[in-house]
Amino acid sequence: MKKVRKPKTTNHSVSAEQAMRLAGRYLMNTYRRPALLFVRGRGCYLYDHRGRKYLDFLGGLAVNALGYSHPRLTRVIRREAARAVHVSNLFHNSYQGPLARKLAEWSGLERVFFCNSGTEAVEGAIKLARLAAHKRGTEGKARVLALENSFHGRTFGALSITYPAKYREPFAPLVPGIEFVRFNDIADLEAKFDDSVCAIVIEPIQGEGGIYPVSAAFWTRARELASHYDAALIADEIQSGLGRTGRPFAYQRYTGLPDIVVIAKPLAGGLPLGAVVARESFAESFSPGLHGSTFGGGPLACAVALEFLSTIEDDNLLENVRERGSQLRSELARLAGDFDFIREVRGEGLILGIELAVEGKAYVEGALREGLIINCTHERVLRLLPPFIVTERQVDEFTERFRQVLKKTKRPHAVAAEFAEKKDRNALAASR
């Protein structure tokens, strides 16, 4: 009987120390990483190369909404990897149409374009808004408004509507025709919005900017002005969307739908996938050849995305997001009463920010020592983005460990002194 040969594979594994040394030698210097290598994850936990367990309340920066190694996603990945990982977009695959329908149902919009990432989705949305304006024959209608404190990505178009100078200035000059509106300032919005504007881009909750929600009044006025001037209202839901707030999309707390929505991060459960979702009146401006993506919407990623959305529905995870978010906020409010350098807790559902009176970097490092994964944005805001599957017990576990972080971490001297002085002034004012 003839023996069947097993397919040959090559073992490329190296030790953790070798992997980190090779990364330092050959990778471009774009990230500051601790001397730590994660090798596997399960549920809301990650495990490093020494076998230490970490409770992940950052969720891969809002990507791992179902945690790690979710059995439903794992089954789909195995099944589709054995069929076809990639099929050219010159042809149909089995999952793009069903996924587009599901996203249309979740969003209330009509058409979808698939890409690979959030920044690509933002680029596609800006192109679509400008193209729609050109096709309507509006002369000079090309300006794009964005908000101060915004973050939309790192490619040139997305970077051009990202506010912090530290991201933009090293790459100037960027795309022209961009202007920034003061956050939640309706008067400034009205002053800058005219018939030359083809789009305004809004994060319903600014994630990288410090977990700041847009006010209902600001959103409503932006919707009115966009309709009046026949411009696109673009909602950037890359971080806040697909269930993160306890709603399918964060903009659903406001009155008035956007014209275009951009999504990515959790959509394919950890695989690269982004999307532009749009009203028919804007989407119809695209025609074959005007936009495209080699890898966007491949069968593997789309199949996993369908399973991700179905899991949220089947397991009623939006309710869990709301309940655990409420529990976590209550616990953080209690901590704020015990630690006077916590200025404010903001956010909705499982996108929360803890604003400190001191710089946050030391607390991120302290959290890692305590077996917690969080991060700091906007210098002083600790950002929490736990998976949607987080349990009541895990919220309690986080709170207990985080309390130890707050106790043990030494505050930066200069900022601590400044805060102590402010605290003394406040105490004096309260006693009068």
Image: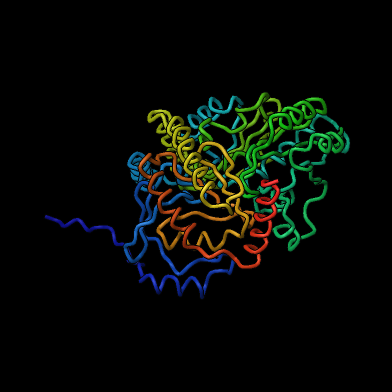
Q: Position of residue 346 (x, y in %)?
A: 59, 42
Q: Residue 105 occupies which quadrant of the picture?
A: top right
User: In the picture shown, does residue 57 fall above or below 12?
Assistant: above
- Residue drawn at x 38%, y 30% is 315
User: In the picture shown, does residue 122 fall above or below 339?
Assistant: above
Q: Is residue 20 left or right of residue 239?
A: left
User: In the picture shown, does residue 364 fall above or below 114?
Assistant: below
Q: Which colour scheme is used?
A: rainbow
Which residue appears farthest toward the front when viewing the image?
432
Is residue 309 visible to us here? yes
- Residue drawn at x 74%, y 36% is 129
Q: Is residue 91 left or right of residue 420?
A: left
Count all numbered tags in the image, as a single digit: 0
- Residue drawn at x 45%, y 46% is 64
Is residue 94 visible to us here? no
Q: Position of residue 311 (x, y in %)?
A: 40, 33
Q: Residue 186 occupies which quadrant of the picture?
A: top right
Q: Which of 46 and 313 is in front in this view?
A: 46
Q: In which quarter of the image is the N terminus?
A: bottom left
Q: Is residue 397 left or right of residue 123?
A: left
Which residue appears farthest toward the left when viewing the image?
1
Q: Position of residue 19 (x, y in %)?
A: 42, 70
